[in-house]
Image: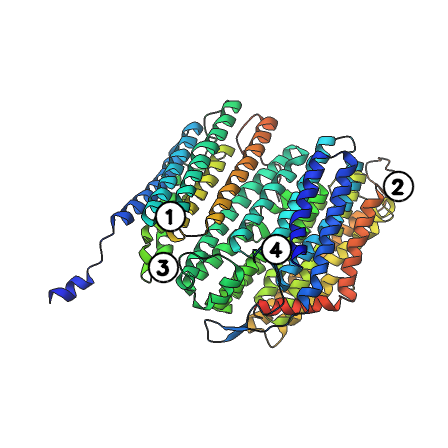
Amino acid sequence: MSLVLIAIMVVPPVAGATSWWAGPRLRGAATVTSGAATFGLALALVPAVARGRPVSRARTAGGGQVVLYGQHAVTALGNWLRVDSLSLVFLLATAFLYALTAIFAVGYVFAEHGADAIYRRRLFAGMNIFAWAMAMAPLVNNIGLLWVAIEVTTVVSALLVAIEGTDSAVEAAWKYVLLGSLGLGLSLLATVVMYHAGSYSLGQAYDLSFTKLVGAAARFPAGTVRLAYLLAVLGFGTKVGFFPVHTWLPDAHSEAPTPVSALLSGALLATCFYAILRYYQITERAAGVAFARDVLAGFGVATLLLGALYLASQRDLKRMLAYSSVEHMGILAIGMSFASPLAVAGVLLHVLAHAAAKGTAFFGAGSVVRKLRTKDLERIRGGMGLLPWSGPLLVAAMLGLSALPPFGTFRSEFSIVAGGLSGASTGLGQVLSAVLVVLVTLAFLGLSWHITQVMASPGPSGGTTVAKGETSKLMVLAMSLALLGLVILGVHPPAQLDNLFHGAVSELGA
Amino acid sequence: MLIPILANVPTPPSTFDGITEAIAVFVLLLVFVMLRQALLHSQVRLYALQSLAVSALAGVLATNEHAGDLFVLAGLSFVLKVIIVPVVVLHLLREAEVDLAGSQRFGVASAVLLGVAVSVFAFLAVGSVHIGGSGAKGLPVPALGAAAATVLVSFVLVMYRADVVSQAIGFFSMENGVSVASLVIAARMQSILEVAFLFDLLVAGVAFALIMRAHHRRSASLSTETLDQLRG
């Protein structure tokens, strides 16, 4: 299994290099092959990781006991690479979306920029490196290297946001690279402070591996760990899209090419949330779960409120989806703050379901924008009639994002709310569950209002004639597969996925 | 009688601690000078000087701890931050033929006062969590406070100036503050990580440069005041 980790580390950069140097046809083929291979390799890890059960325990600062890394984990390169239940959930989300985005991108690029060889070269090479950096983040067993991987995602994706070269794309890229880098500066400080916290019990020179840090966390000074955690939540939270450091997100997601928007929204935000969860793991052992939980609750409520309110007032289709991402990141944070096993399992399912739903939605939005040449919700009309496949698929994705059955987002949000209301949670958790339901309903109303206008209203406006029909079969295929994944997660998630969630819930101490 | 009294007298800082603290405070003071500086070229040179101080701090620590990897780190830091990044930014400035910093969002005095306020906050915050405490393992807490203050004042610089060069320099300066913190409290962190951080800075610098260039080509300006199309 070690070879699988090494293959995941090698395949996307090779595809990136091929995309840069090879001819036009090989670029698309290399990217699709790399995406499919990465997803296949990630799936191959599931049986090996999910069969494990907790075997060891550690004392917390409060005197209690939590389950430690007892699950099966696959390691490689002398423990520098390590995949356990928690990291595999996030790797699956990234790999799934990478595979589908690769398929979508081939159709999108040939329909949109068929003759522009430089654009195609930059987009495919950049996408592969971006996906590689996101896949490496959960793969590395070291909080320093985790930071490096996330910094690489910032640099590459900022350049991809600017790739269209328009005024608004450059503006979005500048805001993104500046805010993202400032946030990552704070998270670098968090890494340094956490190192210092560890030096009290691990000595002056040690490696920053998760296993070592989590194992010794109960002996770390609580105040220092709290400071590191706050810096990490604020720093990585900048890239997750937490309020008030979310301002780059709607701009970057709306101005990036559609395949990049899908990766940014469905995979990158979750990857950065994963980084926060690793600090959460250490903090709950060193400083108690209450502090770790309360910080996430504060950021989660503010972020969900902002996302729900802004959704209703959007005039730009992709920007609306970006605020939907903000809303869903708020849901993840609130779900973690419940700290009950059911809610945490719901959070992990939500990571996968959101990747599938947001992939479908952005792919659909890309098809609509490609067909009607506008992102303005006031000018988009008659999507269902013009796009016989993408139109209904986009509507279904919007229903999925609104957490309606039978989609995976319904199952995940139901688990989160049920976890918040369950006995394992606190009184505050029950209040937050109610707040969550109200705000999610508000977001649902905003999304429904817009999508009904866009898709169900008659014909395109302005007297323009737009031919009926899909732009590319590959774009429809990518959307269909993403939606299929979302339905499977809602109707009958694979049993091994449940085992994976149980393992990850134990690792997170819930 | 005399012995208990002497036991309560705080130990004076060692020469090494004194040098470390002096360099950390110098790094902080340079951000304040950047806040006041209106010429972009001068701002870049101040950043180079600040980076030189950080490299010197790494050198001092390397000498004190007899750590060869810290010498390597000091050398890499010097090449990257004192030479490569400033040269690249100065090259961009020559291409752009602009030297006056963009309009300021508020007055110089207000910016400096805000800088002082966030610095006081940083020192108090670091003091309150006793991060270097518990015997402190020989680590100078005031230096860490200065590093945290450098990070926050650099934030002020980014907010205060409305041009891409000053904002990028603010980010690089913030990274210098993190470097000081890293050297002060985590000097023995694996050198592979330190090198990875430096490499990342280089790559981030390239991304900054490319986007700055694209912005200048489209707007014939380095001001961020024109970046106002995306709202809401």
Q: Residue at x 52, y 34 (%)?
A: B164
Q: Nearer the viewer, mark 4 or mark 3?
A: 4
In terms of sequence position, does the residue under pointer 2 or pointer 4 come before the other?
4
In terms of sequence position, does the residue under pointer 1 or pointer 3 come before the other?
1
Of all chains, the one bearing label 2 is A
The disc label shown at residue A139, or none: 4
Is any atom of residue A151 visible in this view?
yes
Residue type at mark 3?
Ser
* Viewer-proximal residue among A144 and B119: A144
Same subunit, labels 2 and 3: the answer reads no
- Secondary structure of the residue carrying tag 1 is loop
Quadrant in which residue B129 is drawn? bottom left
Measure how far apart labels 2 and 4 are at the Cα level: 44 Å
User: Do the numbered discs 1 and 4 sit on residues whose CB atoms are within 8 Å?
Assistant: no
Instruction: Judge whether B117 appears above or below A91 on screen.
Output: above
Q: Would you name the residue on which mark 3 appears?
A: B128
The disc label shown at residue B67, or none: 1
Q: For the C terminus of chain A, which image quadrant?
A: bottom right
Residue type at mark 1?
Ala
Q: Residues within 10 Å of mark 2 (few under 14, many from 20)?
A: few
x then y, percent, for residue A446: 71, 54
